[in-house]
Image: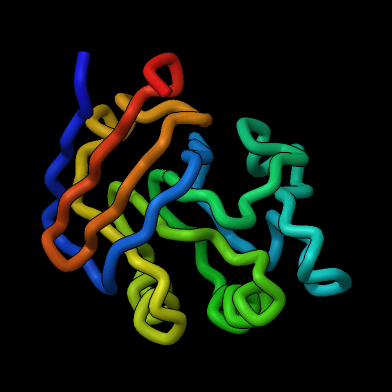
């Protein structure tokens, strides 16, 4: 089996690639990751809200999640993470909360969205993912093929 190619409906930013980190729950960086104290420790720390990625690092990863939750401070948090090299490489989501396109625009981190959640289930944590936000293309190489 070759690459899996998915087509998003919307995209902001350029091209990025990295290992996938799939979160099955909506994400809010203010409540789900304790990065205020140490932005270099880019891990999800909320076991109740994001159990699928609890204690996993998102630094340099392509972060896949269904949608965001609230979080006007998420843009500040992502910019702080980016300043110390701990931000995700790209964002892929089914439905973006309005703050996420703003985060992508401010940081230059590619974002693609408008896929059905069942399409995104073709991506597993550990797969290698390339996001081309300008062309709204997601290329996935399964970890078993790497």
Q: Nearer the viewer, residue 44 or 90?
A: 90
Q: What count of labels does the image hold?
A: 0
Q: Residue at horizontal 23%, vertical 31%?
A: 119
Image quadrant of residue 139? top left
Q: Return the x and y of residue 145 as percentages of the image width and height.
A: 38, 18
Image quadrant of residue 77? bottom right
Q: Is residue 129 above or below residue 31?
A: above
Relative to 60, 118 lies left or right: left
Please name the colour scheme applied to the rendered image: rainbow
Q: Residue at horizontal 38%, vertical 65%?
A: 97
Q: Return the x and y of residue 35 as percentages of the image width and height.
A: 77, 67
Q: Residue at horizontal 17%, vertical 39%?
A: 6
Q: Is residue 89 above or below residue 20?
A: below
Q: Nearer the viewer, residue 37 or 125?
A: 125
Relative to 95, 60 lies left or right: right
Image quadrant of residue 95? bottom left
Q: Residue at horizontal 33%, vertical 74%?
A: 101
Pick the quarter of the image with the C terminus. top left
Relative to 67, 26 lies left or right: right
């Amino acid at each position: 089996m070759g690459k899996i190619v998915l087509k998003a409906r919307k995209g902001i930013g350029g091209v990025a690639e990295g290992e996938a980190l799939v979160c099955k729950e909506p994400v809010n960086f203010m409540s789900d990751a304790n990065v205020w104290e140490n932005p270099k420790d880019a891990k999800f720390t909320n076991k109740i809200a994001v159990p699928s990625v609890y204690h996993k690092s998102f630094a340099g990863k392509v972060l896949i999640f269904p949608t965001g939750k609230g979080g006007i401070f998420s843009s500040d948090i992502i910019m702080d993470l980016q300043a110390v090299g701990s931000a995700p490489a790209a964002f892929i989501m089914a439905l973006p909360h309005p703050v996420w396109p703003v985060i992508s625009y401010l940081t230059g981190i590619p974002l693609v969205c408008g896929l059905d959640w069942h399409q995104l289930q073709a991506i597993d944590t550990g797969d290698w993912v390339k996001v081309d936000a300008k062309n709204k293309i997601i290329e996935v190489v399964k970890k078993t093929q790497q």
